[in-house]
Amino acid sequence: MAENLPVKLYEQIPHTADLALKVYGPDLKGLFENAAFGMFDIILEKEGPVSGKKVKIEVSAPDEGTLLIDWLNELLYVYRETRSSLGGFSVNSVTSTWVSGTAFTGDKGETGEKKEIKAATYHDVKIRPSGDGLETIIIFDV
Amino acid sequence: MTRAFAGKLEKVDDCKWRIPRTYMDGMRVEGLIYADENMIPGILGDNAPQQVANAAHLPGIVRASIAMPDIHWGYGLPIGGVIATDIDSGGVVTPGGVGYDINCGVRLLRSDISASSASRNIKKLLDTLFSTVPAGVGSTGDIHIGAKQQKEVMVKGAAWVVEKGYGWQSDLENCEENGAIDGADPETVSERALKRARAQLGTLGSGNHFLEIQLVDEIYRPEIAEAFGIKEGMITVMIHTGSRGFGHQICTDYASEMIKLSGKYGISVPDRQLSCVPVKSSHGRDYLGAMRSAANFAWGNRQAITHLVRTSFEKVFGESAASMGMTLVYDVAHNIAKLEKYTVDGKERVLCVHRKGATRAFPPGDEALPARYKASGQPVIIPGDMGRYSYLLAGTSLGGETFYSTCHGAGRCLSRTAAVKAARGRSISGELEGKGIFVRWTGRDTLAEEAPSAYKDVTRVVDVVEKAGISAKVARMKPLGVVKG
């Protein structure tokens, strides 16, 4: 019956001052995508766009933990700069030091905004094996 | 996921607890947490002491990795953290010791408005403030500035805003660093940060930022209160905000860069968020140049909001702000790194003092203080939660042991998710109204997340810093009306 259970992609967990998100993924690609979906689930009132204009995001970093945080902060910058809502995150290619992905931009008026995230932080970020996949915890400054 | 601290705190005295260097390999100094016995279970239940120990690894750190009684778990340095590094002994600067909201800080305005008049007009006043001061997630204001003007704000800070007619000369005199720290270098600021600064001058933002109309309900040291222009029954206005997206982007840029530079300088730290470079390196100078630019932007931001607050009061009371005596008591930064001189081991040294969720509290006689505060010591503004109290303290000569630093607020005791859960089915605004406190807010969960029960009792926090002698209680203010972003 276990195969019928919904797969957990991410969950908010308690953090005293800020917000913490536990993210799961079958592999690095899935983990990066789910982290992006989880971050925008915190930010947006409603689900982000699932189609529309695509933006391309490419980031490099010295290791995969730093890369994950830089990927999220790049998405945050694009979100602020384009003043659009973001969704439909897709990672095309990822190594431990480089990631290339896309996101759909949409009308911010349709998704609203409920929470400002100042940044994803590097604090204690570790990508660990979990079951058949990977997991990590990300602390966001809010 | 709040993890309990795995180590043990050793009691030094009634106000201080030590994390010995033996707790963790590589600690260059001990950890020192200011707290009373009753706070210890809460502090141990949170992982913030681990962050105190992590910071003790930073090259050039002197004396101790210190935390104030409002300590709680943050990232990099804990909230309430104070560290100082000797810049001539390889001392480092770390963006993780300042935070993303560079020069988040507080200012306090006094007034001669009577308490009864303020109470009668409180709802009108809040509505006017709410419609005049842009607040909330991604808020933008009416002061749109071009690239040239942005760079001027980065250098001149609050003075630029005053020059444009949004304030008084005395505002600058009564502000930490006179509203602009030297050494800001706009050339070290990224285009990205510049873009994010557009239309954010004069905006409150969201989260724990607020405007609060308060009643001074208790005076502890009348002579100092008089020097601060404060008396019982007086109406004050507190403004809490920072450098907005501009500062966030600068920290993002440099925190990422410093991770990439760690190999170059051969520095190893237990937390990536504490990645750092020597203060006296080109990268250290660049970060400080950019951080100071954001700090000055924040002073400009609080100055612009001060103008909006004064005009709101003028609209409601039909008098000029000057005739209502709405002068600035003081403005303090509580997320910043600054170069200050201290005597350590008998030798005068220039230290890079990082205060993250901690406030500078200079003693009587300090040359950085304006003449009117020379005898009293620096005013220190400590916001509490929106249902209880805030405090005005003064710096003391004993504060040297913490590099003249003290607490910055109440400190959270509940996570935001726990606070929202605890507020389910309740009307926080209704509960506050029952206590005579009126609130205007923007975000859906803001009130629940910022509910009084989510914070420690600020009275307990300031009682510890007073008992420890690192600052002195001067006055207590009770909230009457609050605008939350």
Image (spheres, grey):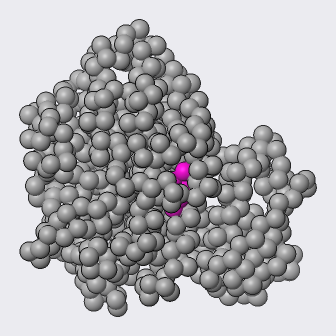
Does residue A61 show up? Answer: yes
Residue B197, percent across and down?
57, 46
**Where is B95 relative to A142, above or below?**
below
Q: Is residue B250 magenta?
A: yes
**Which residue occupies 35% across, 17% down?**
B321
In depth, the one of A78 and A129 nearer the eye is A78
Q: Which residues are magenta?
A: B245-251
Residue B9, percent across and down?
26, 77
Q: Is residue B469 magenta?
A: no
In depth, the one of B396 and B339 nearer the eye is B339
**Which residue occupies 41% across, 62% down?**
B288
Does residue B412 show up? Answer: no
**Where is B317 relative to B220, above or below?**
above
| Image quadrant where residue A108 sits | top right
In depth, the one of B107 and B219 nearer the eye is B107
**Which residue occupies 56% across, 64% down?**
B253
**Where is B224 relative to B342, above or below?**
above
Quarter of the figure that contains the C terminus of chain B: top right
**Which residue occupies 19% across, 70% down?**
B349
Residue that protrudes farthest toward the right in the picture: A51
| Image quadrant where residue B322 sits | top left
